[in-house]
Image: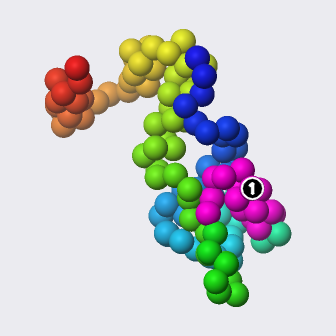
Amino acid sequence: MTSPYPAPKPTEAEVGILQVLWDLGPSSVKEVYSRVGQERALGYTAVLKLMQTMLEKGLLERDESERAHRYWPAQAKSKTQRALLVDFMAKVFGGSAEALVQMALQGRRLRSAEKAALRELLKEKP
């Protein structure tokens, strides 16, 4: 099965930067660094380099019209999550959504509201 994500996929560190940008919206390197640098113990230069690499890979877009360039994800959060999940499901669970869900729920107690939401979601699926 081929990956649904436009190659190359983001690394774990890049996903962390994408999360920050999805939360903040278009941001400067300094703004991203203030959030991700502390969480991941990265220096400003490392965050800058990661974001430049992500731009080259097509994971980010950039506005250079101001002194502090603004970056934002090239893909919507839901599209990226879906593509990464499908890729993970293919690699780890042989493409089986059932196996993925069973593993995710194994050993976990669901609240009544969670069970009801899952039942409704399954009713909607063809």
Residue 61 percent location from the top left of the image: 61, 63
Residue on which the image places disc 1 = 56
Residue 108 versus residue 34 in the image, above or below: above
Which of the 4 quarters of the picture holds residue 41?
bottom right
- The residue most toward the front is 65
Q: How many marks?
A: 1
Between residue 93 and residue 102, name the one nearer to us. Answer: 93
Left or right of 7, for residue 75: left
Secondary structure, magenta segment, majority class: helix
Q: In the rendered image, is residue 68 in sight? A: yes
Which of the 4 quarters of the picture holds residue 84?
top right
Chosen colour scheme:
rainbow
Between residue 95 and residue 112, name the one nearer to us. Answer: 95
Whether the magenta-drawn stretch holds residue 69 is answered as no
Residue 4 versus residue 49 in the image, above or below: above
Residue 14 versus residue 123 in the image, above or below: below
Give the amino acid at mark 1: Glu
Q: In the rendered image, is residue 34 in sight? A: no
Q: Residue at x 63, y 53 (%)?
A: 59
* Dot 1: element: helix
Whether the magenta-drawn stretch holds residue 54 is answered as yes
Between residue 20 and residue 49, name the one nearer to us. Answer: 49
Residue 43 percent location from the top left of the image: 80, 68
Q: Residue at x 47, y 64 (%)?
A: 23
Extent of the magenta region? 46-61
Left or right of 23, for residue 54: right
Query: Where the N terminus falls, by quadrant?
Result: top right
User: Mark 1, residues whose alpha carbon is within 10 Å: few (<14), some, or many (≥20)?
Assistant: few
Q: Residue at x 46, y 44 (%)?
A: 79
Query: Where the C terminus falls, by quadrant?
Result: top left
